[in-house]
Image: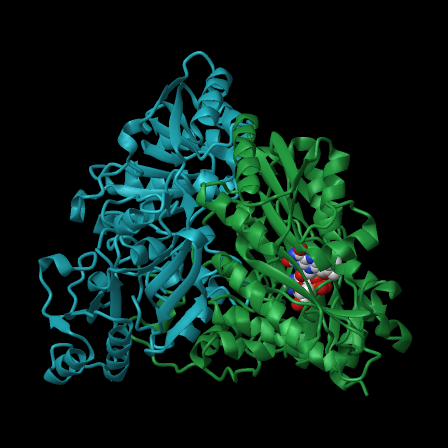
Amino acid sequence: MTTDVRDDAVREALGSACDEVRDPGPRDRVDGVEPGLVARPTSTEQVAEVMRAAAAHGLSVVPRGRGTKLSWGTPPRSADVLLDLGAMDRVLDHAAGDLIVAAQAGTPLQEVQRVAAGGDQRLTLDETVPGGTVGGVLATNASGARRTGFGTARDLLIGITMVRADGVVAKAGGRVVKNVAGYDIGKLLIGSAGTLGVIVDATFRLHPVPPSSRWVSAPVSDPRHALELAQTAVHSQVVPAAVEIGWDGDAGQVSVLLEGRADGVSARVDRLRELLGAGATDDARPPAGGAAYPWDVTASGDDRSTALKLAFCLSGLADVLAAASAAGASVRGSAGSGVLYAALPASKALDATSSAVTTLREACLRHGGSAVVVDAAAAVKQAVDMWGPVPALDLMRRVKDQFDPDHRLAPGRFVGGI
Amino acid sequence: MTSTGVDAVAELAHRLLPAAGVVTDRARLRTYECDGLAHYRVTPALVVIPEDSDQLAAIVRACAEQQVPYVARGSGTGLSGGALPHAEGVLVVTSRMRTIREVRREDQRAVVDPGVINLDVTRAATPHGYYYAPDPSSQQICSIGGNVAENSGGAHCLKYGFTTNHVVGADFVTPTGDTVRLGGDAPDAPGYDLLGAVVGSEGTLGIVTTVTVKLTRLPEEVRTLLVGFESTDQAGAATSAMIAAGIVPAAVEMMDALAIEAAEAAVQCNYPDGAGAVLVIELDGAAEDVAAEYADVERLCAENGSFEQRLATDPTDRALIWKGRKSAFAAVGRISPDYIVQDGVIPRTALPEVLSAIAELSGSSGVRVANVFHAGDGNLHPLVLFDDAIEGAGEAAEKVSGAILDLCIEHGGSITGEHGVGMDKAKYMPRMYTDDDLDTMQLVRCAFDPAGISNPGKLFPTPRLCGEVPGRHKGAHPLQEAGLAEVF
Ligand SMILES: Cc1cc2nc3c(=O)[nH]c(=O)nc-3n(C[C@H](O)[C@H](O)[C@H](O)COP(=O)(O)OP(=O)(O)OC[C@H]3O[C@@H](n4cnc5c(N)ncnc54)[C@H](O)[C@@H]3O)c2cc1C
């Protein structure tokens, strides 16, 4: 049933489904894979039409926001249609009194924040790669420093609209924070890398912007010391919004974000500085320039560092940092949540990279977690196991088979070849 | 009347479990005929009470082999008929699986069996300076497994979220009898967030056994304030003013005059005399911040017409304030022989409008409605009062109760904020969701439970036939996708 994508019939079907259909340019490659055509719908109905046309012609479809994290995961087996959601970029609703915001999938997170800020509110989801969209952030489950205090997308998303592989439009959740009617489809879509459905809009709960915030940082000289300070911060009574660590070679810095009312924050800064010891300082700016990841997010192709997401139970921090030192990785992330990001230089030899990934993964697994290679040069992606063990993979496949029986959506981009 | 399938499961259960763990006697079976929503009653064909997850999985496997429906039951406090048994099925009760396996302060985690009582998790964590945040009013009796299934909330979800925000991993017995691990001890396990779909699925996707929960640091300072207003409008306006001022209290609970009257009669909580509404406001966090917020809350309540404010100064006072609120459902029994506990959600800003519409409904129908709710997040619990001895009263109450849900939907809200859909509200699901929405949810059901044996008849108004999925595959060879021939 597979058709040549550039077939007139296909082009016509897609053209009548959506306002803009064009040939791909060099910047439309999906991790090295050249798409057949680019479709840029302007409405949910058009997304549905594109998916129906793709189904009728047996085409694979890869959704894209602004493409800031499009190279994450494994490259797709095929991308007949690159579904560009960039034209669906409106904030649909900001109900300040109800502390919610709704936006189309292609809306940059920055735009959502701009609108929310009008009500002195924010979506407490840190932007980790500049320019990322709502849909992209959800599909990759990206999160930043504030996850320690406020959770991740799964804790903030309250409603979602998706277009299924067969073109059916479905909603789950709603626009109220509390709602237990039906399955939480939103959670399934978070982190699904475009493989279960096309996210077209999303509704989130907001938080008030705290009037004051400050970082308290202290240097750490070895993994045990890092663990000790991180534990001090998480068990303290200063209510940290973030407990971050930066780690390079065999030293680093623990940084704690305190937010709230000015008087409260300044009192807590004093208390925390005392707790963290003589070397502690405080600053309005985030540590290490504030970048979320220890790799260059603008690098592409073979210049990409091997980028990993490390998850572990909090007490495993020292062990994971020691593994990072052994593996030659620079590390940054949330010591307060047990989620760190590690970068291995692009210049590292393939077998050294492979064994570094193994070292890091073993450390994370020892502490109840996982190590996932989120991005890397093509050769690395081919050589290493990107995901490590994935419990319940069979059940995941069954979910995929129900939502996308023809494996049309982002084929091969996810765990176990999903 | 029991089928041979059930007999086969019973036989296995007798072999695997001690005598007390298998109930076949008619009279004893009847003690399990309902959950907290007592007007639905069905006697199960068989009750099994396994002692560990291996036994539980073996029973489920037998059900799968015999195609016998089964229903999980924790403490049976559910308010939507979720644990209502199946007449030809097996009721799997977790009440003998009550071990708290680990409390790990250093990881902010506890690992508990499904029958463990919610409050016991907090009790185990408190010596370490931690607690388990979701606190349904039933927390002294409800189980963690039930909480997971219902995604239960509590008075403090405004600030701390619901069960789903505090459960990170679970061992899970699928409807085919396999045991798999969902989520993990650490966050962000690779792959789909299946745990996210299982939480709140009301036992229709399978049974959770050992659960890993997040523990939350006990706050340094807690202030509980009881505030009397003349009207619910004033109390609602005060709530809005707090939110607008950027304050996120741990809890903001409202009760109207009728609910106060009931609570007074039941537990003598000594709420302000003559109040048309009270707010119970709790602030928690670091001492300095709580002090500053408290000053603002005091002022905002006064500006919005409060006539009395009472700050609990010790744990006894605080407990008394909460007692009035937490006993509200049962307390209504003091002022009415029968009542329906409704659970709906509206956007908080619609509160005044919806409350006056409820008052109108009540006025025009002559059915009294007491209002208790989580004002901070717009989760209403109207208590619809009636006397079943009067002919037609039950139907009239049912009508008012349904009309309240319609109001919630009209205002963009939900038909349930925490009690679940269960048996009771399955018929309302199509009012909130389209056929396509429901069909999509059922895809999840089909993935987990293609035979439809796990708690059938709940949640969805009509089951979906799962059918075989088309075998058309694109690109990769199925072997490669199955991981049997991975191309590295
Ligand atoms: C007085 C009172 C006050 C209440 N207050 C609140 C409140 O404030 N907030 C709130 O959210 N709820 C409240 N509830 C409702 C109820 O207590 C919760 O829904 C609770 O989580 C149910 O737990 P349970 O152990 O009693 O579950 P059950 O009633 O036994 O079962 C509930 C559902 O969970 C399923 N289930 C049970 N165990 C498992 C398992 N291990 N795996 C999979 N599925 C399972 C059952 O099949 C059923 O569908 C209240 C109830 C009462 C009676």
Q: Colour of chain A?
A: cyan
Q: Is residue B454 left or right of residue A245?
A: right
Q: Is residue B147 above or below residue B252?
A: below
Would residue A397 be visible to someone looking at this image? no
Q: Quick one: B35 or A198, which is closer to the camera?
A: B35
Report the colour scheme.
by chain
Which quarter is ligand 1 in?
A: bottom right
The image quarter in which residue A200 lies: bottom left
Residue B360: x %, y % from top left:
60, 71
Residue depicted at x 46% and y 39% = A148
Q: Could you say which chain is coloured green in the image?
A: B
Residue B193: x %, y % from top left:
47, 58
Would residue A194 be visible to someone looking at this image? yes
Q: Is residue A162 above or below residue A278?
A: below
Residue at the farthest bottom position: B1
Residue B313: x %, y % from top left:
71, 31
Residue depicted at x 87% and y 64% = B20
Q: Quick one: B249 or A397, which is closer to the camera?
A: B249
Residue depicted at x 46% and y 81% = B435
Residue A161: x %, y % from top left:
37, 67
Q: Quick one: B178 or B215, which is closer to the camera?
A: B215
Quarter holding the C terminus of chain A? bottom left
Q: Is residue B299 left or right of residue B208?
A: left
Q: Is residue A75 left or right of residue B251?
A: left
